[in-house]
Image: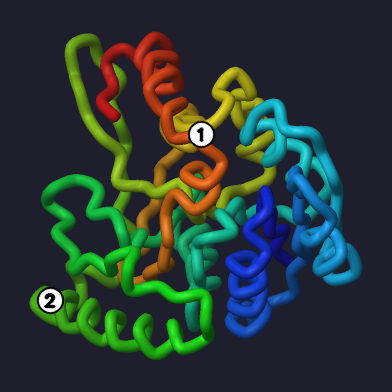
Amino acid sequence: MLDIVVAVKNQLNITKEWFRRISTFTPIPYNIYLVDNSNDESVRNEFQNKTHYSRITFTSLSKLWNDGIKMGSNPFVCVINNDAYVGEGWTSLLDGFSQDPNIGCITPIESTYVGPKHIDIPIFRNEEFTNERNCDQRIALHYQKYKGWLAKFHPGEYKVWLKNNIPFTEGRSTKLPTTGCCMIFKRTVFDEIGGFDERFQIFHEDVDFHVRINEKYTLGVAVDILVYHIRGVTVNQEGMGGRIHESGDQFRQKHPFFSI
């Protein structure tokens, strides 16, 4: 079984579509732990009886995630944004853990972010999303385009788990190919490294988490699995965007030889 943890602040319609896609495209047993810090009761009214629901006052996104993870007990955890839309086959992310016992965390490719420049994927732009269910058609068309991009390569070059063991040596600057909008990891790894660092109020807590995992374990990227990320829905509406600079400074102080 899989524990799925999502933090929500308002954004009821976005979250309803997220929930529909999780329900539709998750064929394995799972629990959803929804951590709510909304300003009203709309999210509670919609999801209190559909998920393992909790209402927590916001101090940091890391704390919301940590608290949600600690409510569960399954051996694998997925932390995912409520504006990250999964599709058919997304839970095959879990296959990588059986292929390589040293993998600590696996992420898909995020549709609106190319990551390192050598992963030059076709971009699914934010304006292509709607809050209506016809976004399924737009996503299907983009996935066809993405599969065409993958077909340029020999199957062995992309139907693999890309592994990125970062050497932490002075003067080396590097960037992880992993995404924070959807990440699956072992609960034992979460416990071992101490969870998400709650000193990051919002932004860069996911990168810090991956860096700390990568000190002992391999990070996997499934390049043939896409998750569609609307990006910035909550932080833009709630006026949190400016905090990215503060958290960036925190990250660079903690990991001075790592680029973000």
Look at the numbered disc 2 and give the secondary structure of its residue.
Answer: loop
Question: Which circle's residue, 2 or 1, is located before the other in the chain?
Answer: 2
Q: Residue at x 79, y 34 (%)?
A: 57
Quote the CA–CA distance across marks 2 and 1: 42 Å
Q: Residue at x 37, y 69 (%)?
A: 226
219 w.r.t. 241: above or below: below
Front residue (pair 243, 166): 243
Q: Residue at x 28, y 22 (%)?
A: 258
What kind of residue is marked 1?
A: Met
State whether residue 103 appears in this view.
no
The circle on residue 240 is 1
What kind of residue is marked 2?
A: His
Residue 97 on image: x %, y %: 52, 58
Front residue (pair 218, 148): 148
Mark 2 — residue? Answer: 154
How dense is the environment of label 2, judged by Cα within 10 Å: few (below 14), some, or many (20 and up)? few
Residue 137 on image: x %, y %: 39, 90
Q: Quadrant of residue 191?
A: top right
Front residue (pair 89, 8): 8
Look at the numbered disc 1 and give the secondary structure of its residue.
Answer: loop
The circle on residue 35 is none
Residue 259 on image: x %, y %: 25, 25
